[in-house]
Amino acid sequence: MSETTRLKSLRIALAAFGAMFIVGLPLFMFVVWPSGWSWHTGHSHYPLMIVGVYATLGVFLLMAARNPAAHGSLIQFTAWSSIVHGLIMAFQSFDGTGNTGHLVGDVPALLVIGIVLLALAPRGEVAALRQRSA
């Protein structure tokens, strides 16, 4: 994949993931399929806290989509924290409390986000050159 194609794809991915974090996460957690996305039962403050954190991250991902080379740390953080979060949730989904639905919901979603961002992230000298010229 050429660097131009990689950068265009990264911009699209950042915008898509940002929008998903802002709009899609609340929609799936509260309306469409709560058992595949939400880890609470009964009354809990947890869902709103998660939505708040991810919506904030979504806004920053949308801003990073304009100039990804200048936001390498944010892209790396989003990628690696998504992978770590997904792996921890995968492990916890086997705790015997009926959380295995997450293995086809938020767990693969987070792993895909992390892998896509790592695959598309600007690399080495190319990223440094782009950042200097921005």
Image (cartoon, grey):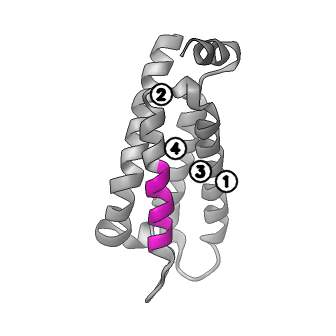
Residue at point 47%, 12% (across, down): 4
Secondary structure of the residue carrying numbered label 3: helix
**Hey, which quadrant is residue 124 in on the image?**
top right
- Residue 10, numbered label: 2
- The local crowd at label 4, few if under 14, some if 14 to 19, many if 20 or more residues have their Cα within 10 Å, is many
In the image, is 77 to the left or to the right of 3? right
Q: Is residue 40 above or below residue 21?
A: below
Q: Is residue 80 above or below residue 107?
A: above
Q: CA distance from mark 4 to mark 1?
A: 11 Å
- Residue 84, numbered label: 1
**Residue to which mark 3 is pinned:** 82
Q: Amino acid at mark 1?
A: Val
Instruction: Say which of 87 and 68 sits in front.
Output: 68
Write down the region rendered in magenta.
Answer: 48-57
Mark 1 or mark 2, which is nearer the start of the sequence? 2
**Residue to which mark 4 is pinned:** 113
Mark 2 or mark 4, which is nearer the start of the sequence? 2
Q: CA distance from mark 2 to mark 1?
A: 21 Å
Q: CA distance from mark 4 to mark 3?
A: 7 Å
Secondary structure of the residue carrying numbered label 1: helix
Instruction: Say which of 103 and 122 sits in front.
Output: 122
Mark 3 or mark 4, which is nearer the start of the sequence? 3
